Each structure stands twice: as C-alpha cells, then as structure tokens.
Amino acid sequence: MTAPTPLPVLEVFAVALLFAVHDQHNHIGISHLLAAITKTTATVDSLTPPSATLHPAPHVEMSFTPEAASAIQSLRESDALTVDSLRSALLAINLHP
C-alpha cells in the first residue's frame, strides 16, 4: 500500500472550510486546518459526490481565526506556501499561543 498524496495548500483550505461549516463555526481555526492537513486523499475524495453531475452550492465566506491568520501570515515572506510549512507554523502557534 502506498502513502497517500499530500493535499495542495488550497485544497487544505477548502477542506478546513468544510470542517468549520460542519462544526457550525464562524471562523476557520487552527484545529480545522490541522485536521484538513492530516486527512488522506482517499478521505477527501469521499467528500466528492459519486455522480459526475455538479450542483450549485451556496456562496460561503469565512475568515480565519486570528491565530490561524497569524500562522498563515508568518509564511507570507517565504518563497512557497507548502503543506509542510503550514503545518509547522500552525503547530508553533498552537504550542505557543
């Protein structure tokens, strides 16, 4: 069995949004982002409807919590925002609030 392919950062943000909506939160928090990072590709694929038919979805806008935004902002000056760098920044904020 091969290891799952890591999610691109934008997909991590999208999955974190789904988790926040599911939890009925008003913001995307560090816990949502970390949960999205740890999800496997197979699990994320299970969120996709099995049919090829696409249906309209309501427009959802949700901001990050100040802590999550701070972690993301700390990576702004780096050359590339990767899942690994995001995970490290989130854990650093989570360990030293």
Image (cartoon, grey):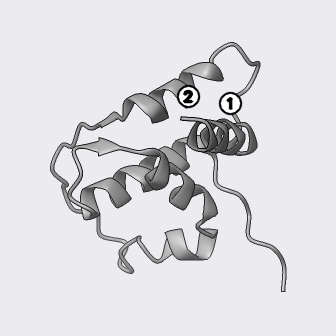
Circles 1 and 2 in contact, beta carbons < 8 Å: yes
Circle 2 sits on which residue?
72
Tell me which label, 1 or 2, sits earlier in the chain.
2
Q: Nearer the viewer, residue 92 or 8?
A: 92
Badge 1 marks a residue whose secondary structure is: loop
Q: Nearer the viewer, residue 31 or 47?
A: 31
Q: Residue at x 27, y 62 (%)?
A: 23
Occupied quadrant, residue 62: top left
Q: How many marks?
A: 2
Q: Which residue ends up furthest to the front in the rendered image? A: 96
User: Label 1 amino acid?
Assistant: Leu
Question: Callout 1 environment at 10 Å: few (<14), some (14 to 19), or many (20+)?
Answer: some
Circle 1 sits on which residue?
81
Establish if 77 lies above or below 80. above
In the visual, does 82 lie left or right of 59?
A: right
| For discs 1 and 2, the disc positioned in front in the rendered view | 2
